[in-house]
Image (cartoon, rainbow, N blue to C red):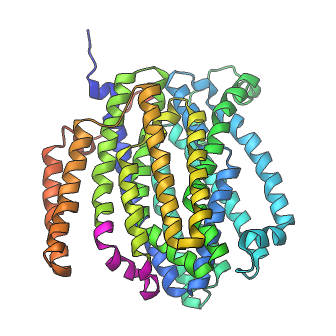
Amino acid sequence: MVTTSPRRATGTRDVARGGLANLIGAGYAGVASFATTAIVTRIATPEDAGVYFAAISVLLIAVSMLELGVPVGNVYFISRYRSLGRTNALRKVLVAGSSPLLGFCAIALTLAVIFREQLGNAIFGRNVDAAGTVILILCLGAIAAIIADSTLGATRGFGVMRTTVVADKFVNPTIQLLALIVLWSVGMTGGPELIGTRVLAFAAVAGISIPWLLKLVRKSSMPSGQTFRQSWVPEASMFREYWAFAGPRSLGQIAQVAIQRVDIVLIGLWLGPAEAAVYAAATRFLIFGQLTAAAIGTAVQPRISALASRRERSQLQDLYRVSTSWVVLATWPLYLTFILEAPTLMLVFGDDYSRGAILLQLLSAAMLVATACGAVDAVLLMAGKSTWTMYNAWFALAVNLALNIWLIPQLGIVGAAVAWVAAICANNLVPLVQAKIGIGVHPFGRSSMLAMLSATTLFGVLPWLVKSAGGGPIGAVVTLVLAAVVYSLMLWRWRALIELDGLLRRRRPSSRGRGEF
């Protein structure tokens, strides 16, 4: 009898390979996103920079509303059907998601174009000139972003991470950086021009992801003798199943994005674009850890869906714990460094932004809590608990909005940071309890606890002791370098425990349903 090792059953090595590629892409995207923020704050006035940050926040909130949960629906159902051998239904899944999406987006964006002046004044108030023009640009960006996200979600459902890494992690930020450099060289650094660079980047991603998805669809197996209707037209039951999952996820996604972005919009509306620019600049440091955690979460989603569909709880538990250790190992050194060195780091954006240091410290502390919970939202979601994630996200958003309304008038941008801290904690601790009670899994094990302890000691306690002893900037740099060296040696020593060895081995040919990078 042939036995299957726990690691192979869990598929951690396959996830690790996709996760490594996503981590590399996330690292580049994080650096590029940070560079984008630094360039915007340097080449534009604080007012124009604030308009840019507020408009991009509006764009991302709008995209989350218009996508209707289709990107994650594509990941869930395509990966699920592939794992169950129902490859004849994959084309129908795409139609079940895309047809209502296209109709809804066409209606919503047409209304936005018709009422652009009224909508622009309602969102931006009197702080933005040519608000109607900004709305038109945002509508173009929404179209490109929705197409890109939906097609990338489908490619991940097919088990292919390469498309997301290449298009979203590399091409996307590179196009925007190049466009910003061109605008700076010709002296066009107003708010609408800056916003246009983000739209151009989304369009480039869509242009890459669409043909890639079509290639995967053509390669997928289809029973012979099926008519076009049998291959592409979904049954009413599939529509109901798809939207019973995607509908709640859509509402949850709106809340998730709003939690991260609504405070910038409110600050710009109530305190002015300059204050919004300071707040947005401080939060940009978090992008390094956020993209890293999202990259790992994206990589584990298809595997979680497959394990959950087969009710393999012990393997799901192993995957959740190991992936949490990856998230902690990759992000805690960053967040701990941000807490200790925030005043110095904020000077990257200029002297006008130095008062954002306290914001960076507060939010980094909250992200330590969030990353310790691992990909908890992905676990609930891919286990079919999209309704739970919706309620969780809206509860966290309610906390965020209530505290923003209360604290921003009293504490300004610090009040907004406190509100976001509370929302982050609510949005991760509540799902953590649900995952344990409802599914029977949690992220805490030997590997994850070891990751937390080592990161805290080397990048938290040790640099703090040196700083307290008056080590100065040179002492801080030397300490970080030494900590990084020791950290790397520890990771190599523990590579089997945290299953990093899977990242270093040559990829074997994938079997049916296991996907590819």
Res. 37 visible in picture: yes
Determine which quarter of the picture holds residue 75: top right
Magenta stretch contains residue 340: yes
Q: Which residues are magenta?
A: 338-355
Quarter of the image for the N terminus: give it. top left
* Above or below: residue 424 compared with residue 189: above
Residue drawn at the location 28% of the way across and 29% of the way down: 7
Location of residue 225 in the rendering, given as x and y in whole percent from the top left corner: 69, 19
**Farthest residue, direction right:** 114
Q: Please identify the dominant SS of the magenta region.
A: helix
Magenta stretch contains residue 153: no
Task: Count the marks.
Answer: 0
Residue drawn at the location 34% of the way across and 78% of the way down: 343
Residue 329 lies left or right of residue 312; in this view the side is left
From the viewer's side, name the closer residue of 485 and 362: 362
Determine which quarter of the picture holds residue 368: bottom left
From the viewer's side, name the closer residue of 272 and 496: 272
**Farthest residue, direction top:** 1
Residue 409 lies left or right of residue 478; in this view the side is right
Location of residue 48 in the rendering, given as x and y in whole percent from the top left corner: 61, 83
* Above or below: residue 184 compared with residue 154: below
Determine which quarter of the picture holds residue 205: bottom right
From the viewer's side, name the closer residue of 470 and 167: 470
Res. 500 visible in picture: no
Location of residue 460 in the rendering, given as x and y in whole percent from the top left corner: 22, 61
Location of residue 172 in the rendering, given as x and y in whole percent from the top left corner: 52, 63
Quarter of the image for the C terminus: give it. top left
Residue drawn at the location 56% of the way across and 84% of the way down: 46
Residue drawn at the location 62% of the way across and 77% of the way down: 271
Residue 449 lies left or right of residue 76; in this view the side is left
